[in-house]
Amino acid sequence: MTEQLTPLISVNNVSFRYNEEDDFLLKDLSFTIYKNEILGIVGENGTGKSTLFSLLNLDLSPTSGEIVYENPELEMAQLLQKNNFNFNIPLTVEDFFLYFVPQKTNWGQEEILEILQLTKTKKQKLSDLSFGQKRRLFMARTLLTSKADIYLFDEPLTGIDRAGQDQFLELITILKEKFGKTIIFIEHNLSALLRQSDRVLCLGPKVHWHPKKDFTQKILPHLYSCDYEHILLHEKL
């Protein structure tokens, strides 16, 4: 992160539950999101990671507490883990960009396609794309069509091979360092999360933070509340 931290969003004592009879998914959560940082979020299933994204994106409202945008014109773009797009429609990747992406975009289309390893797929039918290619296709669309200050990525590395993961991590570094963007991403790939993030927010029974300087073997037991050897097993799988 830069030495002079510029706050973009303040989360103040936020708690959330979907119904009054439910337990709180998030409880008394407070933190600040800064300009030009990469924030990683980790936690077991059911700890409110995706719900936090919906709160930050104002798709949900806190049960209590508040989320304050320091600039009311702040824009976000979110890449969901799943989408309902019909990939069986008779279009190629080239057609997809023609019909679903404006001709004037914020990035060079060829540059994005190359970074996301989609250049050679332009003549392929959408229905023939692999799971990872489909995710990268929507990642490309998000980047090309949005003027966002903050990008939210929900498990962006799922279904992508190691080479593709490295390309994505390079991309978010470019977003931060070249364009001054803020990136928040949920990820179960701990090595990528720790390698790329400036800070890590761990959601669970106890919410805690880890700055970059603490990214050592010692913090791993805190991430999933399990021991280091267990986490190494997850990584090998």
Image: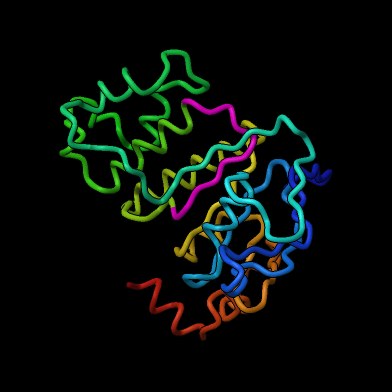
In the picture, measured across the screen, residue 124 lies left or right of residue 143, that is left
Look at the image and say whether residue 128 sits in the magenta stretch: no
What residue sits 60% from the left and 37% below the top? 76
> Within the image, what quadrant is residue 13 found in?
bottom right
Q: How many labels does the image show?
A: 0
Q: Give the range drawn in magenta.
A: 145-155
Point out residue 40 in the picture as x, y percentages from the top left corner.
59, 57
Point out residue 107 in the picture as x, y percentages from the top left corner.
49, 23
In the picture, measured across the screen, residue 7 lies left or right of residue 80, that is right
Vertical order, 79 against 226 (above or below): above
Q: Which residue lies furthest to the top in this view?
A: 103
Vertical order, 166 against 209 (above or below): above
What residue sits 41% from the left and 13% below the top? 103
What residue sits 20% from the left and 26% below the top? 92
> Within the image, what quadrant is residue 174 found in?
top right
Q: Which colour scheme is used?
A: rainbow
Point out residue 123 in the picture as x, y percentages from the top left corner.
18, 25
Q: Which residue lies furthest to the right in this view?
A: 4
What residue sits 48% from the left and 32% below the top? 143
In the picture, measured across the screen, residue 36 lies left or right of residue 231, that is right
Look at the image and say whether residue 148 sits in the magenta stretch: yes
Point out residue 208 in the picture as x, y percentages from the top left corner.
69, 71
Along the viewing direction, whichever of 142 and 62 lies nearer the viewer: 62
